[in-house]
Structures are given as C-alpha cells and as structure tokens.
Amino acid sequence: MRTGLNVRKRKDGLYEARYMKGRTEEGRIVYGSFYGKTLEEAAAKQPGEADE
C-alpha cells in the first residue's frame, strides 16, 4: 500500500489532498478531497496525516 501524503498542485494553483474514505461493495476505493492555498494547509486538513 502507498504511504505518505497524497497531495497535488492543480492548474488553478490550489493544492488538493486526497484521502481514502472507504470502499464500495465491489472493493473499489472511495476518495475524499481537501483543498488549500498551500501544500501545508491542504495536508493539515487530511485526517490522521497532520502529525507526519
């Protein structure tokens, strides 16, 4: 499994942090997103990732 932050910079300049919300009945991953003006701001919004 991949570890670490899952943050990317979008074309509009915002950073998008994604996290795994859960799985569907078929086993596919369902993602949620947080946005921020800086990488640190977006990463701090991620549940359980702010400590790292």
Image (cartoon, helix red, strand yellow):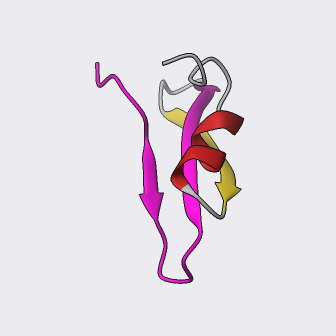
Whether residue 51 is visible here, answered yes or no, is yes
Q: Residue at x 33, y 22 (%)?
A: 3
- Residue 25 sits above or below residue 32 on the image: above
Q: Position of residue 50 (x, y in %)?
A: 60, 24
The foreground one among 16 and 23 is 16
Q: Quadrant of the N terminus?
A: top left
Residue at 49%, 72% in the rendered image: 10
The stretch drawn in magenta includes residue 27: no
Residue 11 versus residue 47 in the image, above or below? below
The percent coordinates of residue 14 (x first, y second) are 59, 69
Quadrant of the rendered image containing residue 12: bottom right
User: On the picture, is 52 further left or further right than 43?
Assistant: left
Measured as percent of width and height from the top left, residue 40 is found at: 57, 45
Any magenta on residue 13?
Answer: yes
The residue shown at (58%, 58%) is 38
Q: Residue furthest left?
A: 1
Q: Which residue is outermost to the bottom?
A: 12
Q: Nearer the viewer, residue 31 or 2?
A: 2
Q: What x and y, as percent, mark residue 37?
A: 65, 64
In the displayed structure, 25 sits above or below 11; it is above
Residue 35, above or below 51: below
- Residue 24 visible? The answer is no
- Please give the range of residues in magenta: 1-24
Left or right: 7, with 13 as reference point: left
Count of marks overlaid on the render: 0
